[in-house]
Image (cartoon, helix red, strand yellow):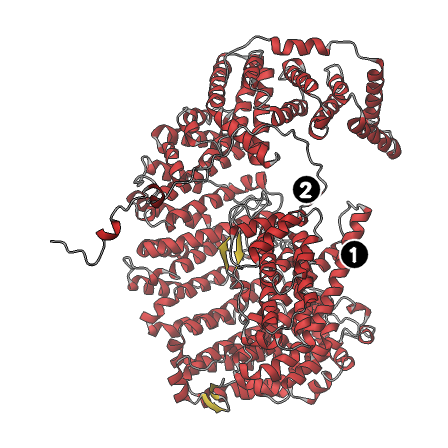
Amino acid sequence: MASPAGPGAAGGAAAAAAAPVPEATAAALRTVVSALECIMDLSATNEQRQAAHTVCEDFKENCPDCIECGLQLARKEYSAVVRHFGLQSVEHWIKYRWHEVNDTKRTALKRSALNLIYEGTNDILVEEQHIKDAVSRILVELIKREWPQLWENLFADFTQLCENGETQTELVLQVLLRLSEDIVRFQTVPQPRRKDLQQALTKAMSSIFSFFLYTLNGSLEKYRAKTDEEREKACRICRAILETLTGFVEWVPITHITDSGLLPLICSLLLDEKLCLAASECLLLIVGRKGRVSDRQPLMVLFSQEAMTVLLQAASNATEHITESSNFIFLKRLCEILLEIGKQLCTLWGSQHTEEQGQPPNFQMYLKALMAFTQHPSQSLRQMVYSMWHIFLRHELASKDPLFTEIMPTLIQCGTVCLHKVGFPSQQNSVSCEYSRMEFDTDEEFNVVLCNLRMSVVDSIRMMTLMVPKMTFSVASSWLKELLAKPIVVGTGADSDKGICNLSSPSFIAWDACSVFLEAVMSKVFLADAEMPKVEEGIDLLHSVLSYEMQDPLILSAVLSCISGLFPFLTFTPQTLPRVLARIFDAVVFNLPGQTKSTRSQAVKNVRVHACSILVKICKNYPELLLPEFQHLYNSVKQLDRDPEQLSQMEKIILIEALIIVSNQFHNFSRQSAFIEEVLQPVKQLWSSEEFIRAFSSPECFMSYVGLDQAAVEPSSADTCGINRSHITYCINTILAVIKRSKWPEDYTVAERGGFVVQGENGNFLRNPATPHVCPLLDNVIALLKTGCCLFKPESLKLRHPDFLKAYDLMEHDRLNILGIPPACVDNSDSLVYRHPLERMQNFITALFEHSFHILGNASSCLGVEIYSAPGLSKVIIENLIANYTLLHDYRARILIRNFLKLFIQHCPKEHHHDVAVPILRILCPETYQRLMGRWQVLNKRAEERAENDEEEDIDTQEVLEDHLVRHLTREYLDFLNLVLFGKNVSSEVKEEMPMDDGDLPNKGGANTTTSFKDLSDLGTVVMGLQDLYPSVIMCILTGFSWADTNVCHKCSLMLWPVCRQLVNQKEISPEAAQHCFMSVLSGLQLHGQHDACYSTLLHLAMTFYETLRKDFPVMTAVLQQIPGVDSKLIYELDEKILPKPGNDRKKKEIFKKIVANIVGKNIGQQFRRAAQYSNLPRLFLESRRPKQESLDEVEKDDMGLCELFSPSKVFD
């Protein structure tokens, strides 16, 4: 810093502090102390405490001698509470009453602040941390207002203070840290003043870092040489320096860190037990620096032998004492340091912006360090490290490095370990459990990390399989063979006495991990360009798995997964297919001894459904291979279906799906149609029966048929209404399965040859073989949905039996999912699933709506254009569904839009826009707009009431649920409007383009872009051309800006301008409408401007509106003039630039941002923030503009002969 100076700077202040206190000041002090004691008194009443708070606030705001009193209260003889308030009072005066202080008083205040550091606190080991913090903040506030212009000798004063001992040194370090945070990290200083401070700080950085190193080295010497109290003081200073460095190392020029020898010194402290954590925090910020790529090159020094050795030794030391939480935190910091070093390496490796950076020295040691963390028992550490492995595996050069490829076998083996589901805090089956208990309170929290880890491992296995397929397959094969030869180890827990595994059994954990590993390998093994495994090995492995006999349901499920993973080898051995099918059908009918259809455990049910799903998978992936076996499959399913005690409803439907998928390979319309007719025959008999027609005819009949108006019946086998519900569910699911699985050939020539092409009025179209059989069934589907909607009429609600009053509520798992609550980790594999009658009824009602709307939606997308040609289609949908749309709860209304209307509108042919889509939209859009308006009014009213009442207690769970449901419905409907206006679902197609100019955000971080607006689709153009339809669309978009949901605001901002542009082109927008649209956008900017993404999009949208419409609608200027505190000159300047020639001009954006700056929304922490006061100091560093360089024509007045030199007539010899 500066050369040492004498103690005179603080001596005068000490004498001033010892002066006698006037009586008026003493009285004020007594009043404040009494008020503070009342506030902290447990026996004081609320009224007394409130009065005491008023006294304290009045003292800070109005006391003319606040500084003197505050300094008196800060004296060491008072309690910590009184001292802290006194220091706060001084800080408050400096921040908010600075203009009341004259120069003389400011000079005295600086002396007093220095004196507080000199002798205003107790010893470093005794003083409270919050007192130290308050003392440092006073000096920081003074520095922000005086330095460097009016306080040139600041660092000389600091040096003088530090010579007085560790107490003063620690306070000076805290001042530097807080100063750096306020200027750089938090940026709490006004921009011009902040720029001066940062430049002055940067200019003095060499001296500051010299001070850090000098103090750190001196304190380390004392720390290592002294004992007891002196050692502890030196340790405190070392920690304070490291903490202070965290405020600088992220932004100072890298040379201050690398050239000063700071990096090796910090690395060496990683081995110190008391300083390692602070050192790791500092080092992590250094290695994680962002910025220019060339500035990161010096960080490669960390690949030196010494640095790598220290990192490995530090990790080893922390692991030895891992039972201490601080050591585990330190271990995680070390892991993060290694990851950041690796990321910097991958950024530099092969970069064109730096010197040739290839394999760094000691790269092998670094990889071993990463591998050590990968092999660590902590699952969270493993999850962190795998992110680095992914970066290496995706890096074009690093992934091919010889040293990296050498370690790949070990990494593959680590994957086999990391896939094991172990480490739950409630269990004791692994060393990982001990680490999990240090980090997680519940199994649910841990399960999130474990699932992420397993996904990361699977991704890495897939990437390595593309690189070394033979190696990964060899590991998978060896692991599977090992498990096939091992006996089953059940372990402890449920069903262990029966010899059956549970979810925590060692054998099941191993089998589960192996099956996941094998499937990851097999998904990529035939896509790799490297040396492939021998096909014979795969076929032999498949035969070995097929020969493995297992009666444990959990293990059998894992075996089925392995068979599923090995399916690709079937193409090389078609003769094995019958064995595979036989094994699958054995699992389809799997049962444990003594179990029947009604008493099967959950694990058995899972195995059977798993086997059915695997059959669907093989049929879907290898339909040509399965085609010769179709008759065998058909006969097997038929035989199973004859036994009523064999297949469950779900199992039967999944098997039917598999048959339909294979039948698509017939490529013969008549044959496929005949087969589907056979499949649907039993459904048709039920679905078209008089019994069903009568049941679907009215809510009363339906409630009686399914038992909603009757008492709950137990057991379920005695519930005759339950059988009725089962029949309805079976029909719905079968119809849905047929619609989704039945396809026409993808090749048009094959389709034409097979009879799938039909001549229509508007040309040829493809016909689905299921269409003639499904279409007649859709009438009853619509009738069922109409009746289902009418269940919510008041008169129908009264008919419910008390046992089923909550039958229409959300299912519990759906409720938890909406609220973001993870499901409980429960092992129910051995239990018989029992559902309460109410739960069974809830499940039926939910499935009824979801699957029935799915039928209509998938019919629109799968059955072809014939659906839209049905006479009176829109009328049927309106009268039966849309007319009853308002009766549905929000979560069921969302299902109607998501499952049916989106697909229906998306696949509506252009020729049916007017007669099918538009009539539906005419009813749906106004009703939904009114519905959302009402819902958001309720939410806004609740928010206002909570704000007025200052409620701090938790909001009722039901209110939170309703809030989420309204938001979900709103977003779903806006996605639907996007689909109507722009074609396909834009939620995945929104393109962020046109980077905003620098400074688009008002002191906000993060990258920002504005959005390029899309063009309307054909249907969107039709909708915006209908005067009875487009108002409800555009009003919903405009009103969306006033709803407190940033997602909704973003969706609305993407849609507004295209629809308004269409209205402008149609000359259907009035000045009042243009003004209203513009005001809505500005109101959105006021409500959502605090969010970076919304701010950039809304600012661009508002600018587009004004720039485009200003010329035709001068009233737009009046809107801007209504902005509080707006400068009219800015509006005039903006108009001057816009009216002659609209365009993308940076200057226009800057002016517009200044105009709307006063209405941009702020977060709650900024809304009522009091502005701190600063003096207008002369600028220390003035911006110098480069002088304009004169052109050559201005310099050379005479003819230089350039024209003659390039003349075509010039002849050169």
Amino acid at pointer 1 = Lys
Horizontally, residue 1079 falls left or right of residue 755, namely right
Which element carries disc 2, helix, strand or loop?
Answer: helix
Q: Nearer the viewer, residue 926 or 409?
A: 926
- In the figure, is residue 366 to the left or right of 767? left
Query: Residue at horizontal 60%, vertical 84%?
Result: 683
Mark 2 is on which residue type? Gln
Point 67% across, 75% down: residue: 1029
Q: Position of residue 398 (x, y in %)?
A: 33, 46
- Asked if residue 844 shows in the view, the reply is no
User: Is 877 left or right of 475, judged from the image as shown?
Assistant: right
Q: Residue 984, can we see it?
A: yes
Q: Nearer the viewer, residue 1100 or 280?
A: 1100
Question: Disc count in the image?
Answer: 2
Mark 1 crowd level (few <14, some 14–19, many ≥20, 10 Å Cα) = few
Image spot of residue 449 (x, y percent): 54, 48
The residue that label 2 is drawn on is: 1166
Q: Which residue is mark 1?
A: 941
Q: Position of residue 659 (x, y in %)?
A: 48, 79
Q: Gap in Å between the C-alphas at discs 1 and 2? A: 23 Å
Find numbered disc 1 in the image and state the secondary structure of the residue it sits on. helix
- Is residue 558 shown left or right of residue 919? left
957 to 844, vertically: above or below? above
Q: For label 2, count other residues whose C-alpha is less than 10 Å away and answer few (under 14), some (14-19) or many (20+).
A: few
